[in-house]
Image (cartoon, helix red, strand yellow):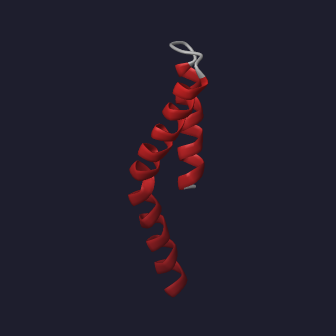
Amino acid sequence: MNGILSVLTSIIVMSLSFIFTTDFIYLTVIYFATFFITYCWFWPEFFKAIKKTAKRANA
């Protein structure tokens, strides 16, 4: 889920970036920077979901 959210966010940002530039190098940098930032942003939520699932399995 974490990776999916990061990829979707990056694609949306890259699509919006077409308004400002059509240079492929800039779009690639924007895509990977956004992917990295959103991946780190969603990372704590990912661990919370794992912990909740583990608690349910042990109960």
Q: Nearer the viewer, residue 11 or 53?
A: 11
Image side of residue 42 versus residue 31, left or right: left
- Residue 29 appears at what percent x and percent y? 50, 34
Instruction: Identify the image quadrant of residue 44.
Output: bottom left
- Of residue 21 and residue 42, the one placed in the foreground of this image is 21
In the rendered view, tell whether residue 58 sits above or below residue 13: below
Residue 2 appears in the picture as rendered = yes
- Res. 24 image quadrant: top right
In this rendering, the count of numbered labels is: 0
Residue sitting at x 53%, y 54%: 2
Along the line of sight, the residue nearer the viewer: 24 or 11: 24
Residue at x 50% of width, y 13% of height: 20
- Rendered residue at 58%/17% (across/down): 18
Name the residue located 59 percent from the left edge and 39 percent from the top edge. 8
Residue 21 percent across, percent down from the top left: 54, 15
Q: Residue furthest front?
A: 25
Can residue 59 be seen?
no
Q: Residue furthest bottom?
A: 58
Quadrant of image for the N terminus: bottom right
Q: Position of residue 57 (x, y in %)?
A: 54, 82
Residue 13 in picture, x, y percent from top left = 52, 28
Q: Residue 44 vs residue 32: left or right?
A: left
Residue 10's place in the image compared with 45, above or below, is above
